[in-house]
């Protein structure tokens, strides 16, 4: 992206260039993926209501438990089997009880736990208190019963002597109790408030998943049954059960729906061992005053089921901006087709795939390799090979001996008829004998015999010290390109080179100083366009063969006999 350095840059527009491959196979794959993506986007848009703005529910819960239970000893009503809430949005129902009545503060033997069993007073320490004990030891060892002695403690006596819950549960009939759940909800973003009790509420209804799914009155036994538990079993040790109220509300005017869905599941671990205290229980006491003013209490260990009411949900309403955001994000999925087809086209380059000429053809049309500006990068072209060779490594030997990567050159733009002067009709048929094609000087006959370098394959090269100038026009032994008639017509003909210079600069003064230098450099550029194509990136790092360079230098020599040679681009 160009830098915004002026108003002109700001007003520029950039777009991508597309390569269109006319293939039934790849076209079918593209439309198949587009169809699947379109179907997926539409289904998700409707099913998940992605066109809606969403808001989380805010709620309050109130419960009322009703029922009466009768045991062998007494009647239990709501005031006795319901205990103040043990948490937020929850209620507790007593199902089993261990009662220790007429407790007063005094001295009595400890319950025979491991650390309280003794044989003599030495086993008991005055003032010792254990977290598992019921009081503080006095230092005496007394009889607990006819066979066991325990340490005497100062505590509420008599000590609670029953440790295991009664079976069956004392209040097992509590499964017939009912609870009314009042749930008010609010969606702040939409200023919408409702509750789970409808104006047409029938107070005689009882929740049923099929016949009365919206009734807010629940039978406790049905709740445990929906949670996959038996009330009679859970009532012995107690437990924790969750009542889930899910508000999934559609607040659109044309499809309004906002009703609760109830679910039930057990929350505590029913498989816990005795060491981990399974179930749910706690202790509390009722205190009295005797006639003599002494305090007395009844200790109650209550087992029961705690019901946690879990309210959650989302409300949604149509929002145009949410729809635009979803459509914008969904459009990116259509790029999967291009990604997959591109993978198929370029898969032939992976070693694990077989070579495919069709894929190779598409790959060359789509992908263009552009090497980075590295100073070791060079391009060479041989007359006996149809391609250009890219060499990107530090030269430690003759450039002729190094193998590189094949680069396909772009031809077609070089043979412009406007760059060559029209030939005279009386000219000889042989290009080598035409007067306009004769070089400025011809010193080949007078040149002394030179030894052929080891890297030369055409016999026309001269010795050179730099590795990058040790390059022949051929890869294998054969005739030199400099002996071809086209070489002389394009590169050694003064009229042709002058025409090329004037074509590029019509006002150029050809009679200025150092005319040979201009003609020599024009011949270099003409050779690069001829052998390397019209790619400017290749032209800047193209290396002329040694034989061609000296042939051009002999045709258009330097006045002082000095030449700069090939200069590596940084």
Image (cartoon, rainbow, N blue to C red):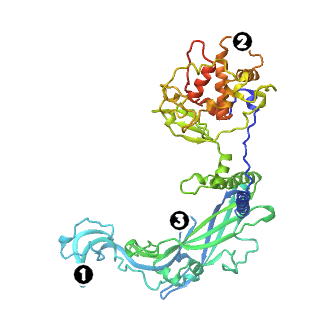
Does label 2 or label 3 sit earlier along the sequence? 3
Q: Quadrant of the C terminus?
A: top right
- Give the number of the mark in front: 2 or 1: 2
* Quarter of the view holding residue 409: top right
Percent of width and height locating residue 461: 54, 28
Q: Looking at this view, is 360 or 459 the one in front?
A: 459
Does label 1 or label 3 sit earlier along the sequence? 3
- Disc 1 packing (10 Å; few <14; some 14–19; many ≥20): few
Badge 2 is on which residue? 511
- Give the number of the mark in front: 2 or 3: 2
* CB atoms of marks 1 and 3 within 8 Å: no
Q: Is residue 22 left or right of residue 538?
A: right
Percent of width and height locating residue 96: 47, 80
Q: Which mark is residue 31?
A: none
How far, Cα to Cα, is label 2 from label 1?
134 Å
Q: Is residue 99 left or right of residue 255?
A: left
How far, Cα to Cα, is label 1 from label 3?
41 Å
- Disc 3 packing (10 Å; few <14; some 14–19; many ≥20): few
């Amino acid at each position: 992206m160009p830098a915004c350095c002026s108003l002109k840059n700001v007003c520029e527009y950039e777009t991508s260039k597309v390569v269109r491959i006319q293939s039934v196979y790849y076209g079918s794959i593209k439309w198949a993926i587009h169809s699947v993506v379109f179907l997926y986007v539409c289904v998700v848009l409707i099913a998940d209501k992605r066109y809606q703005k969403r808001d989380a529910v805010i709620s309050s819960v109130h419960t009322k438990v009703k029922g009466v239970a009768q045991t062998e000893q007494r009647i239990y009503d709501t005031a006795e089997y319901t205990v103040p809430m043990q948490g937020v949005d929850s209620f507790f129902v007593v199902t089993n009880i261990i009662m220790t009545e007429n407790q007063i503060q005094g001295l009595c033997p400890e319950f025979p736990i491991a650390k309280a069993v003794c044989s003599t007073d030495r086993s008991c320490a005055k003032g010792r208190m254990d977290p598992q004990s019921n009081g503080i030891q006095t230092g005496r060892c007394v009889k607990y019963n006819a066979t066991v002695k325990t340490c005497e403690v100062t505590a509420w006596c008599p000590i609670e002597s029953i440790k295991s819950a009664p079976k069956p549960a004392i209040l097992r009939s509590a499964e017939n109790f009912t609870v009314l759940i009042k749930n008010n909800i609010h969606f702040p973003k939409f200023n919408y408030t409702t509750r789970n009790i409808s104006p047409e509420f029938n107070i005689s209804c009882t929740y049923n998943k099929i016949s009365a799914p919206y009734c807010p009155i629940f039978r406790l036994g049905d709740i445990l049954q929906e949670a996959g538990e038996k009330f009679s079993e859970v009532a012995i040790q107690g437990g924790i059960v969750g009542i889930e109220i899910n508000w999934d509300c559609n607040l659109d005017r044309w499809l309004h729906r906002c009703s609760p869905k109830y679910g039930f599941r057990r929350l505590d671990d029913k498989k816990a061992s005795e060491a981990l205290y399974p179930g749910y229980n706690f202790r509390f006491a009722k205190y009295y005053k005797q006639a003599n003013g002494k305090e007395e209490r009844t200790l109650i260990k209550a087992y029961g089921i705690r019901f946690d009411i879990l309210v959650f949900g989302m409300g949604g309403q149509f929002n145009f901006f949410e729809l635009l955001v979803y459509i914008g994000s969904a459009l990116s999925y259509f790029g999967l087709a291009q990604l997959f087809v591109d993978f198929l086209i370029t898969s032939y380059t992976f070693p694990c795939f077989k070579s495919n000429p069709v894929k190779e053809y598409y790959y060359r049309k789509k992908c263009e390799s552009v090497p980075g500006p590295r100073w070791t990068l060079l391009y060479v072209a041989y007359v006996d090979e149809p391609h250009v060779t890219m060499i990107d490594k530090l030269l430690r030997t003759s450039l002729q001996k190094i193998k590189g990567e094949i680069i396909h050159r772009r031809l077609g733009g070089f043979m412009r008829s406007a760059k060559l002067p029209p030939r005279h009709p009386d000219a000889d048929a042989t290009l080598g004998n035409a007067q306009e094609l004769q070089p400025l000087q011809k010193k080949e006959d007078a040149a002394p015999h030179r030894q052929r370098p080891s890297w030369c394959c055409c016999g026309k090269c001269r010795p050179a010290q730099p590795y990058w100038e040790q390059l022949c026009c051929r890869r294998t032994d054969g005739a030199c390109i400099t002996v071809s008639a086209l070489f002389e017509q394009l590169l050694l003909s003064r009229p042709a080179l002058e025409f090329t210079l004037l074509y590029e600069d019509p006002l150029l003064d050809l009679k200025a100083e150092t005319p040979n230098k201009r003609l020599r450099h024009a011949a270099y550029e003409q050779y690069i366009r001829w052998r390397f194509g019209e790619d400017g990136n290749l032209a800047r790092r193209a290396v002329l063969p040694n034989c061609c360079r000296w042939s051009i230098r002999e045709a258009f020599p330097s006045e002082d006999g000095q030449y700069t040679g090939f200069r590596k681009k940084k």
